[in-house]
Image (tube, rainbow, N blue to C red):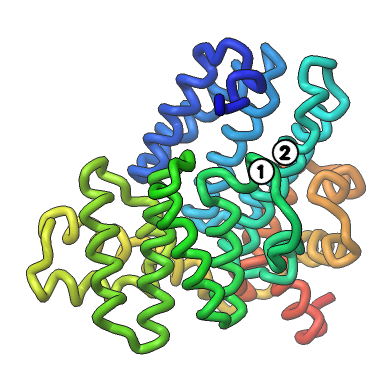
Amino acid sequence: MACPLEHIVPGFGHGMDRLIQAEAALVRCQMVEAERFAVGAIAAAQEEQQYFLEMSAEFTLMRRAIYQGDYIGAMDWMEKIRGTAENALQGQSRVKDYTMVYRQVTLLSEGFLYTAIGQPEKVPEVFAERKGKSGWLMGSMGLGNLIRARLAALMGNAAIALSECEIVLELGHHQVHHSQLIRLSALILKSVVQRRLMMDGPSRTAMAQAVAEAELDGIRLPFAENAREILPILRALHRRGEEPQEFLAKIIALCENREECRSNCVKPEQEAPLSPREREVLAEAAQGLTQKQIAAKLGIKEVTVKKHLISVYAKLGVSGKVAAIRMAQVKKII
């Protein structure tokens, strides 16, 4: 059966080329290039009203923000994905038959974001239960199964996590369109869960397979995204002389760097009090206002609101808005 992508993105064109270049840069952790090509893809997509392409490029930029520890930025891109979906649903008649596609892209994006930043309570319910049939997009490439596996791992359900990983890994045997990046992510998650279950041998085997497959195309992103839990496994492989040694050493160095950056972002910069403006911004956020709404209410730029929130997170030693609000309430800051 032909993939309906060709109907969603008429003519493909240079916008799709830029998206592919953005994805290629992203998986190799070349973040400057990833942003440049993704922004170009968005511009080209908007010119031709290629909504699926636009959402895909926004998803690329959301993942870039997650990798960089910019959770506020990632949530901003999630809002842009929702906005593009709304534009598509209200758009021209040529895309009206793909209403479910845009809704599913939104669900997949939300599932990926909230499992990545450790907020399982915000993951769409569709990933918590396997009831009914999913459409072509939700079922394709294994992304839905991978998100379900990530959610299960977050909730401590190893059996479901392993089962969903195996579904992803089996897709290639059933002539299902498959994503190499999703397959690698499933192998890595499988290794992590097996290590939690004290299955060290199988865990090393799965990770060694992931490293060997990733080396062929220089893929690094899924390792860096899971730096904390996979570093012990990677180091064990390196000590055992597993091949490819040179690529394995590069992955270890990348993960060590990402873990150091992540730790530095989470720790408070110093015991500095919040400024009056930071308190004001956080108080408005606690009322449920978006960054855009806060900016309008306080008469400042949206980017200024974002900077204030980032500063608040650093000072409080947290990594997100919900935790910052809770911490501030406990300390009676707001």
The residue sitting at 26% across, 41% down in the picture is 217
The image quarter containing residue 88 is: top right
Q: Which residue is mark 2?
A: 80
Badge 1 element: helix
The residue sitting at 52% across, 79% down in the picture is 159
- Which of 124/289 is in front? 124
Q: In the rendered image, which quarter contains the C terminus? A: bottom right
Is 331 rendered above or below residue 89?
Answer: below
Badge 2 element: helix
Do the residues bearing badges 1 and 2 touch, measured as CB atoms within 8 Å? yes
Is 33 rendered above or below residue 112?
Answer: above
Q: In the rendered image, which quarter contains the N terminus? A: top right
Q: Which residue is mark 1?
A: 77
Query: Is residue 268 in view from this perspective?
Result: no
Is 124 rendered above or below residue 172?
Answer: below
Residue furthest out toward the left: 241
Q: Position of residue 194 (x, y in %)?
A: 38, 79
Q: Amino acid at mark 2?
A: Lys
Q: Which mark is residue 230?
A: none
